[in-house]
Amino acid sequence: MMKKVIVTGGTGMLGSALIRLLISKQISVLVLVRPGTNRMDMVPVSEYVKVQECDVNHLLTLKGKIADDYDAFFHFAWGGTHGGARDDVMLQNRNVQATLEAVELAHAAGCHTFLGAGSQAEYGRVDGIPLSPDTPTNPETGYGIGKLCAGSMSRILCRKYGMKHIWVRILSTYGPGDGLHTMVMSGILQMLKGERPQYTLGEQMWDYLYCDDAARAFYLAAEYGKDGAIYPVGSGKVRPLSEYICSIRDAIDPGIEIGFGEIPYYDKQVMYLCADIRTLTEDTGFEPEISFEEGIRRTIAWVRGHS
């Protein structure tokens, strides 16, 4: 059982949700954050949490400076996750190197388990079928290629050190602290201002998972997952994107008009995105617990409290 863990990316939505869960289980957490980050308020304050500033591209500077009595390492830090930065190949290559340094630091800290955050982007476009651990990968962006490479190389390094390696391929998640550019958060912000949001037709069939459910999936995968496993993380269910958008609108103001079809689909638009979570459930017992509507209510309440 885990008693002490290390987390990178703790100022992000998913890392923060994971830390909250670990605190609830009285697990001590060392959070590695970028020096000068403006998102320190996302790191929960607790007697179980210790924060250490460190450039995530130079994690090995901490080698020998932290105790060697940690159990697991959760690596979520990753630069260039949206926009043009996704195809900044030099940046994505540095992310791969940072992941390998994270494994080295995990080994030096005595960890027996390493969990890395992958992405559905590793698969590329796979329309019409749920994404399983065995679905062929064909990434089309530097981001997806970098994630795939980081997962494969970190697995090799963990094998060398005798550490359990878990790679979670995350689909669409949302919740408090979500990025401003995402469909969910940008929509909430616009609608709270009373603005009329514009979207595509919203025919995409997508899978959304609330951050607290995702955090449980990460914890269970690290604790009970099988060495070398790849686990797609999502709800395992799909709905048209237009339904998600209408749920957001209804939770804020049912009278807001939505401009469906006023924005064209993106080039290489993913029209079907669903996680096959059967292996994750079989290995760890994970089942989603929070509906999209409930998750949206919580997210809206958080945004209002931080306005």
Image (tube, grey):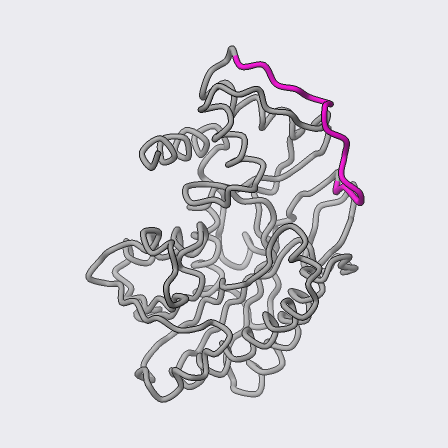
Query: Magenta part mainly helix, strand or loop?
Result: loop
Q: Is residue 203 above or below residue 43?
A: above
Q: Is residue 131 left or right of residue 290?
A: right
Q: Quadrant of the C terminus?
A: top left
Front one among 23 and 34: 34
Q: Quadrant of the N terminus?
A: bottom left
Residue 220 lies in what quarter of the image? bottom left
The answer to whether residue 108 is seen in the rendering is: yes
Residue extending furthest toward the left: 47
Across and down, in percent, residue 288 comes to: 49, 42
Is 261 within the magenta? yes
Across and down, in percent, residue 55 comes to: 44, 73
Across and down, in percent, residue 58 comes to: 48, 78
Q: Residue at x 45, y 20 (%)?
A: 252
Front one among 230 and 49: 49
Front one among 235 and 15: 15
Q: Is residue 68 left or right of residue 90?
A: left
Q: Is residue 126 above or below residue 283?
A: above
Across and down, in percent, residue 128 comes to: 78, 41
Q: Is residue 88 above or below residue 82?
A: below
The answer to whether residue 1 is seen in the rendering is: no
Is 193 within the magenta? no
Residue extending furthest toward the top: 255
The magenta span reads 256-270
Q: Residue at x 34, y 77 (%)?
A: 70
**Label tally:** 0
Q: Residue at x 64, y 25 (%)?
A: 198
Front one among 227 and 100: 100
